[in-house]
Image (tube, rainbow, N blue to C red):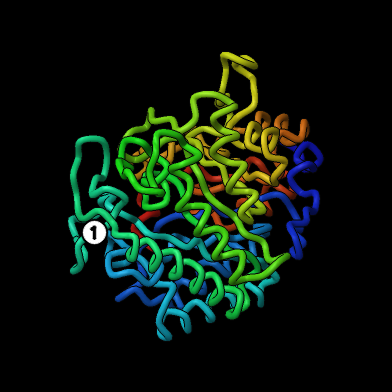
Amino acid sequence: MTASATDVLFKPFRIGSLDLPNRIVMAPMTRAFAAEGIPGEAQAAYYRRRAEGGVGLILSEGTVIDRPASRNDPGIPFFHGEPALGGWKQVIDAVHGAGGRMGPQLWHTGATKSFMTEWVPDAPVESPSGYDAPDVPRGEAMSEEAIADSVAAFARAAADAKRLGFDVVELHGAHGYLIDQFFWSGSNLRTDRYGGATIRERSRFAAEVVAAVREAVGPGYPLILRLSQWKQQDYAARLAETPDLMADWLQPLVEAGVDVLHCSQRRFWEPEFPEIDGENGLNFAGWAKKLTGATTISVGSVGLSGDFMAAFGGEGSSSVGLDRLVERMERDEFDLIAVGRALITDPDWVSKVRDGNAGELKGFDAAALGELV
C-alpha cells in the first residue's frame, strides 16, 4: 500500500483543546510490568518509542484508581500515591519530549479475574452485585458508600492526570470490568438506583463517574470512554441489541461529559447491526457516532490477521493490508482508529504506514508480551 493510499489516516484532528497530527491511536494494552504498581524508566522508554514512531495519541495501559481491590494483577500500575504519580510524570514528560500526546486509561477491574495470573488482592473484590458473570459469584456487592468512594477516586485520578500534564484521560468502561459490570444485566442485579431492567438505568454509575471526572478536569479537557458490547466473560454478550437501545445507553454518557466514545470490538470490520445495513454496514464506532454525534474511535485487529484475545493464548498474527480500514475512514464512518498489538511488535508501525513501507510491517509475535520494549 502506498503512502498516498493511506492519506486519510494522517489528516489532523481536534478533540476539545487537543490537536492530533493524525488519526492513529495507540490502544491501551495491559502489560503488567510495573513492580509494586510503580511505573518507571522502562514504561517511560516504552511509550516514548511509540511517540517517536509517529503515533498520534497514546493511551496508556490500564492504571488503577485508589480503591482497595481495584486491580487483578500485581504488575498493573497505580494511578494514585506519590511514587506512582511521580512515575507517570516521568512517562508523560518522555512522551512530550518526543513530540507525542498521551492520556492514562483509568481502571477498576471489579470482580473480573486476570487471565494471566492467579494473584488476588488483599481486600475483597467488589462489583455491583458480587458477581463476575451470570451465575458466577465473586467478591462483595458494593455499598452506596463504596460506589460514592469509587466515583470520587476516578475524579481524583483524572484531576491528577491533568495536573501531571497528560493531554487526555480515558475511562475503562469495557470488557467486563467494573463500569461494564454495572452496564451488564448479567452482573448487575441491584434493586436500588444503580440497577434496573433497562440499560439506561444501569448506566447511572458510569454517568456519575463521567460527570465527576468532567467537573474535576473542567471544560475543554478531552474525556474518552472505552466501551464494548462483548465481555471477557462472554464474547457474545450484547448490551444493546438495537440502535434504539444503543442510543439509550450512549446518549446519557455523552450528555454527562464524554467527548470521545472508544468503541471496542474484536474485529473492526464487523458490522454492528447487519440486519439493518448489511454485511458492510456500520461497525460499533460507526453506529455510536451516528446515534450520538460524538467523536468515536474504532479498534479491533487493525493490520493483523488474528484476534487480540488469542494473543494471550500464545497465538501470533501476520500483517495484513489496511484497505478495509482506509475505505471506512474515507467514508467518515468513525474519526480515529486504535492500533494495539501491531505497536507492541513494532514501535515504528505508524511511520512505516505513513511512508508507504508496507513491506516492512511486521506481524505480531505473542512472545513480545513477555517483555517491555
Residue 345 appears in the figure: no
Q: Secondary structure at mark 1?
A: loop
Please state if 269 lies on the left or on the right of 66 as rendered.
right
Q: Residue at x 53, y 65 (%)?
A: 104
Q: Residues within 10 Å of mark 1 (few under 14, many from 20)?
A: many
Rendered view: 289 above or below 108: above
Q: Is residue 81 or residue 368 the one in the foreground?
A: 81
Residue, far front:
192
Q: Which residue is mark 1?
A: 125
In the rendered image, residue 219, in percent from the top left (x then y), is placed at 71, 66
Query: Dividing the image into 4 quarters, which one contains the N terminus?
Result: top right
Q: Residue at x 63, y 36 (%)?
A: 288
Q: Is residue 151 or residue 46 the one in the foreground?
A: 151
Q: Residue at x 34, y 60 (%)?
A: 144
Quarter of the image holding residue 103?
A: bottom right
Q: Is residue 5 or residue 277 the one in the foreground?
A: 277
Quarter of the image holding residue 21?
A: bottom right
What amino acid type should be assigned to the residue bearing mark 1? Answer: Val
Residue 271 appears in the figure: yes
Quarter of the image holding residue 294?
A: top right
Rendered view: 38 above or below 73: below
In the rendered image, residue 17, in percent from the top left (x then y), is placed at 76, 65
Q: Is residue 171 or residue 42 the one in the foreground?
A: 171
In the rendered image, residue 83, in percent from the top left (x then y), is placed at 40, 85
Q: Residue at x 73, y 57 (%)?
A: 15
